[in-house]
Amino acid sequence: MADSPRHARLSGLGAYRPSVVVPNSAIVGRIDSSDEWVQQRSGIRERRWSAPEETVRHMAVEAGRQALERAGLEPAQIDCVIVATVSHFQQLPALATLVAHDLGTEQPAAFDISAACAGFCHGVALAADLVRGGSSRHVLVIGVERLSEFTDPDDRGTAFIFADGAGAAVVSPSDVPAIGPVVWGSDGSQADLIAQREDWRDVVASDEPRMPYLTMQGSAVFRWASFAMAKVGLEALERAGIGVDELDCFVPHQANNRITDAMARAMHLPERVRIARDVVEQGNTSAASIPLALDRMYADGDAAPGDRALLIAFGSGLAYAAQVVVLP
């Protein structure tokens, strides 16, 4: 048996942004609001929604294909596919199995995980452990969501927040540490702060066709994420053996610019640390938000290969995860 690698790294990143751009002006009329109010509350100016043909399967495949190309790998070299999503509405088969097939892989392990907005970071942590443990050599991790279908257009607290998209990363062996230890957890006592409005069984039993939309207690989520997650971020830095002065990029889940600012202040991040702001034009894409934010940072020149980035995600559950990575 070959020796297992001691370390893991991100070897390639990919992204898919849907084609429909939705400005605040298209949202605010139904919630008796304004563009100014939405921007002050969240930082969001517009978001991306999917066209009918841009299914979660399609978006996941496109993001995954780009990640493979950037990693310089063939589909046959992928031996595990992990898809993080809460908006694959078909209970089975797992979306990951379909994506793996569409990409032309050779029957890898493939499974979905449901950790909402924290899903991508959970997937990276699992992939890194699989590579270090020798169970896999190259793992494709995809976060994909189509939350436009899951959002109540008349809910003033959520109608302007959620969006669609996909992001992916390949996790591969490394000679040096490049994915730090994960800090993760959950607080089920607060699970009702971000939840599905109804059980699917109640929807099916109803005479009124409808979606069990997402609900969120925004103020409580803001307080929890702004301060509790800053502590998680600092712990991830400590476990990786680096200080805030050695960090290049901060890439939090793109939930809300005000939450991002509060976390940065609480962690005392130096001004030179570049901070992801993809939420302004993309909206909150849950499990896809961190890889999409990284894609934006590369495009804007705010991230480069070799940079040290702190990833931190949080959402329904309340689930969270954070790790320090070296960017590919």
Image: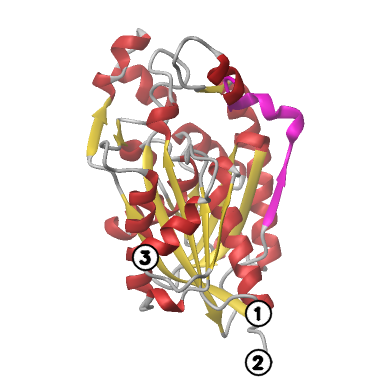
Taking 53 as reference, is 291 above or below it?
below
List the residue tagged with mark 1: 134
Q: Residue at x 38, y 49 (%)?
A: 57
Separation of disc 2 and disc 1 at Cα? 9 Å
Q: Is residue 122 magenta?
A: no
Element under disc 2: loop
Name the residue that disc number 2 marks.
2
Which residue extends farthest top?
A: 32
- Please tell me whether residue 29 is drawn above or below residue 41 in the rendered image: above
**What residue lies at 63% left-to-right and 23% top-to-bottom?**
220
**Circle 2/circle 1 CB separation < 8 Å:** yes
Please tell me whether mark 1 sits on a helix, a strand or a loop: loop
Instruction: Say whether disc 1 or disc 3 marks the residue closer to the N-terminus.
Output: 3
Task: Specify whether residue 157 is in view.
Answer: yes
Q: Of label 3 and label 2, which has the lower sequence position?
A: 2
The image quadrant that residue 80 belongs to is bottom right
Q: Amino acid at mark 2?
A: Ala
- Report the amino acid beneath label 1: Gly
CA gap, disc 3 to disc 2? Answer: 27 Å
Of the pair 246 and 89, the residue shown nearer to us: 89
What residue is disc 3 on?
103
The stretch of residues the image draws in magenta is: 183-198
Q: Is residue 303 visible?
A: no
Mark linked to residue 313: none
The quarter of the rendered structure image containing the N terminus is bottom right
Q: Is residue 39 above or below residue 265?
A: above
Report the quarter where the C terminus lies. Answer: bottom left
